Amino acid sequence: MTMETANAFGASVDLVQNRDVGLYLVIGSEEAPTVVRSNQGRVVTTLGDGRFLAVMTFPSSAAVQQHHEINLCGPVTVDAHRFNSFVSAVGLQDPP
Amino acid sequence: MASVGQELLDVPLPDMVAKLAIGVAAAQAALDANSVDTAIQLAETEISVVPALTQNIAADGTVTFVQADPIDMSLLQIGLNPTFYQFQEASIEVTMDIKTTTSTETNVKVGVRAKVGFAMWSASVRVDVEHNRKFGKEVKGTSRLFTKMVPVPPPPRIFPELTVIDQRSTDDGGTTEPT
């Protein structure tokens, strides 16, 4: 509902959002890790070229995405089957 | 005074439903666009992977390592997928408490007037009765919009299938099946 409707009713609007933590691919300037940390996120893997993986909540990711230092903050998941195939293919461990 | 039924009819429920639906559609489109952008970046972001590392221990105990040439693989290839979200449920709950009160106030004014003089007297009594009916209305309303968003499997065709064909000979002389 828009704030216009809320204002017409003299209502107050409270937003409650899910606080579960997820994994995100973040691309941005060299200040991007600082932006993530300032939004209660945590950088877990640096990929170079301004790209890294970070864990944060969905509201935090929305705030990070809006920041001018950020080009992309997209949710990612690890495909366990594919990752295990990759790990075994490169010889890091035996197939499960 | 508007009736209770009219108060309920005045709730712009169709407007709220329409705006909720439009909001969900806009949010869904934004989420999909973000996931597609993420998929593109996962496909374009490559890391160097050393596929094999050999440790040689010489007779004199010297240890050396030999690594194979690194290969570039995308994050998508190694198993990082974009997450796609979908709005699974959206609901609007409107509750309204309407309390109407009616009170009647009656004011009575009594005036007595008497006059005496020259063996004559007169008297008058005046009574004013005033009725006031007062109406009061108190309306309390709350609305709750609830949306549930869940991750869904990504479109299967955006991922390359990883097939491993191991050409090394096995103990029985054959090769392993593709996995």
Image (cartoon, coloured by chain):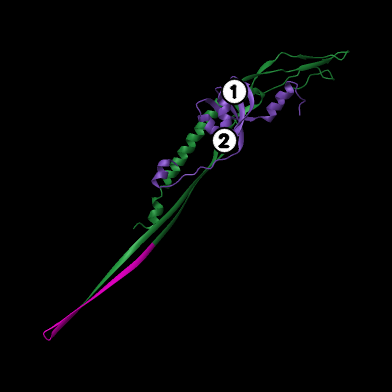
Write the start and end of the magenta stretch as one range. B101-124
Name the residue carrying label 1. Answer: A51
In front: B63, or B52? B63
Kindly tell me whether residue B153 is visible in this rendering.
no
Chain letter for the part of the structure drawn in purple: A
Q: Quadrant of the N terminus of chain B?
A: bottom left
Q: Residue B168 in the image: x percent, y percent?
A: 79, 17
Read off the residue under disc 2: A58
B88 lies above or below B171: below
Q: Which chain can be seen in green?
A: B
Query: Is residue B103 in the magenta section?
Result: yes
Q: Residue at x 40, y 44 (%)?
A: A7
Whether B136 is drawn above or below A14: the answer is: below
Residue A71 or residue B1, whichever sits in front = A71
SS class, disc 1:
strand
The quadrant where residue A37 appears: top right
Q: Secondary structure at mark 2?
A: helix
Mark 1 Cα within 10 Å, few/some/many (few <14, many 20+)?
Answer: many
N-term-proximal mark, 1 vs 2: 1
| A43 up-or-down from B89: above or below | above
Q: Is residue B13 visible?
A: yes
**Circle 1 chain:** A
User: Residue B169, image x and y in percent?
Assistant: 81, 17
Q: Position of residue A73 (x, y in %)?
A: 56, 28
Outermost residue toward the bottom?
B119
- Number of numbered discs: 2
- What amino acid is labelled 1 in the image? Arg
